[in-house]
Amino acid sequence: MRAKCRQESALLPLSRCEEIFEAAVAAGRASGVRDLEAMIGAGTYALTRFANNTIHQNVADRTGYLSIRALMDGRTARASTNRLDREGIQRVVEQAIAITRLQVPDPELLPLAGAADYAEPNRYFATTATATPDHRAKAVREAIAAVEAQSQTAAGIYSTSESALAILNSNGVAAYHAETMAQVSITTMAKDSSGWAKRSACDASDLSPLELALTAARKAGESAAPDEIAPGRYTVVLEPAAVLDLVGQIFGDFSATAMRDERSFLNGRIGQKIFGENINIYDDVTHPLQSGTPFDGEGVPRERVTLVEKGVARNVVYSRQAAHLAGAKPTGHGFPLPNEYGEAPMNIVIAGGETSVEDMISSTERGILVTRLWYIREVDPYQKIMTGMTRDGTFLIEGGRVVRGLKNFRFNQNVIELLSNVEALSPAVRACGEEAFDMVVPAMKVRGFNFTEVTRF
């Protein structure tokens, strides 16, 4: 089956992927092996980096690879190369076959996936693919000028990338996806405070480095001369980046393989109400604010899966193998085989509400506004207790308004408890952080957030 793609990348068009796969199949048959799977990818990545209000680095790279998986007598293994000429293709096929023959048979191994149709969202934009160093430099210079006007110092990155991925196998799968991505991250430093803003989008024209710079500079300015208050439990307003980095830690557990291995906090909790009534979470690759391939590591179409409905844990996601073992239907969330982890939801959407961050603040008599979190680590994997710190804009709320900046806190917070104590949700946005991949999440007003100590930096 030929993939139904809206947009192809000139880096690696589908026709070239099919040529590579035909050469791989021929090499496999010469060795007596018919069952092959090929993962073929290519991409460019360009980055403009700045610090101390000066652009100091511009880098660009272009990559390409071929990864071949062979199946023989209940065995499978994979070999990869970045040589895509005929000799390189033949060699990597021979390597995959040789490694496969050394494996112990796996009684749970399934045959290759079969062909299936999948939705193909348009995530390839010429504005991003053709962005030049000059384009990025002009945008960065404008952002730096805005920060300098506030007597602050800026550092960060502006990156643009283009990628294409194809998965083809000898059972008819021919899945292909091309995508572009742009990302801007900026940190601003004042004498004794800092601010931060970050966004990503498939279309670079959706990003405004100047707007992000002004946001970061405002946060640094408003948090100057930070005060120190006692740690304890406070009502917090978590901006989307803070929600992403903290709540994003739990979604690897929404996996049938994790459940089977009894390493998921959902063991014994599926069908139970574990979060508040206002929490609805699903995985949806077709959401307009999402990114990524509409198929998984075996070429199986990704389905929209409701993970949490009105606080009740409803479903986990399934790879083909996990679904077969559970007597369920695969949801298209498997990682490339072989792997230890099985599957995970990769396109998380936490449904939002209608309360703006400003309204959350105005309705708070005393609380803390958090821009983002970092250095997050898991303390208790079953109760989902996390520790970490605030940074780059932590503020005291009193009488329904932000009154001053605060020194940063360390926290120990049960995420299950957090999602049971959400009082308000903003509309969901595409959020970027440092600790988790990009997701679509709202800001949250949460009661009883547990700050344990004031940090020293």
Image: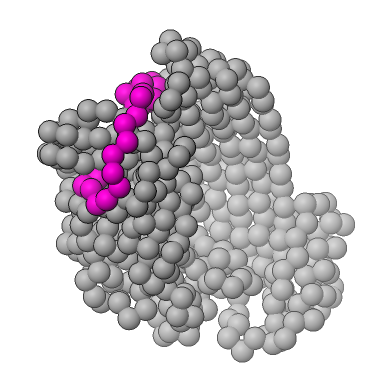
The quadrant holding residue 224 is top left
Q: Residue at x 50, y 53 (%)?
A: 293
Q: Nearer the viewer, residue 250 or 45?
A: 250
Residues drawn in magenta: 211-236
Q: Residue at x 38, y 39 (%)?
A: 408
The quadrant holding residue 99 is bottom right
Q: Is residue 325 above or below residue 383?
A: below
232 in the magenta segment: yes
Find residue 441 and report its horizontal and vertical position in percent: 32, 48
Q: Is residue 78 above or below residue 387?
A: below
Residue placed farthest to the top in the image?
A: 149
Tell me if 225 is positioned left or right of 116 in this view: left
Q: Nearer the viewer, residue 100 or 450?
A: 450
Quadrant of the snapshot with the N terminus? bottom right
Tell me if 155 is positioned left or right of 384 in this view: right
Q: Is residue 355 above or below residue 279?
A: above
Tell me, yes or no, if residue 429 can be seen here. no
